[in-house]
Amino acid sequence: MSATAERLHLLHEHIRLSLLDRKRAISSGAQPDARAVDEIARSLDTLCQGIEQLEREQQQLESNGVLYVPPFFSSPSRTSLC
């Protein structure tokens, strides 16, 4: 796994835990913290940008013949989540 992928995985975990904390707070009747919501939104934007960067790197490796992706995984229906 590349360093970028590892950082994105850690960011994913941070977002997941932040969302769980937010859910717990709302369940207990507390108002959502606007700063926490903004932080989650920024983290999601960063995660999407990182995923898009990894996709571009993968496409570059595929086009250079450095990376082989079986036809099943390289179908035209594959789209970005962001």
Image: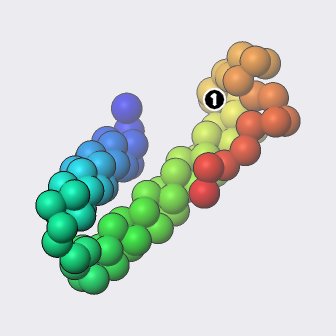
Q: From the viewer's perspective, tell me whether residue 37 is left or right of residue 76.
A: left
Q: From the viewer's perspective, tell me whether residue 82 is left or right of residue 38.
A: right
Q: Is residue 59 above or below residue 14?
A: above
Identify residue for label 1: 66
Three-letter amino acid code at the position of disc 1:
Val
Q: Position of residue 8 (x, y in %)?
A: 36, 49
Residue at position x 18%, y 67% from top? 29
Q: Is residue 29 above or below residue 60?
A: below
Residue 20 visible somewhere in the drawing: yes
Q: Nearer the viewer, residue 4 or 66?
A: 4
Q: Quadrant of the N terminus?
A: top left
Is the image coloured rainbow, by chain, by secondary structure, or in one colour? rainbow
Q: Quadrant of residue 61?
A: top right
Q: Position of residue 13 (x, y in %)?
A: 27, 46
Q: Quadrant of residue 34?
A: bottom left
Q: From the viewer's perspective, tell me whether residue 73 is left or right of residue 12.
A: right
Q: From the viewer's perspective, tell me whether residue 81 is left or right of residue 30.
A: right
Crowd tier of the residue under label 1, counting other residues whose Cα lies within 10 Å: few below 14, some 14–19, many 20 or above: few
In the current view of this chain or complex, which residue is farthest to the right? 76
Q: Quadrant of the C terminus?
A: bottom right
Count of numbered circles on the image: 1
Residue at position x 70%, y 34% from top? 62
Q: Nearer the viewer, residue 31 or 12?
A: 31
Q: Is residue 52 above or below residue 64?
A: below
Residue at position x 62%, y 49% from top? 81
Q: Position of residue 80 (x, y in %)?
A: 66, 49
Q: Is residue 50 above or below residue 29?
A: above
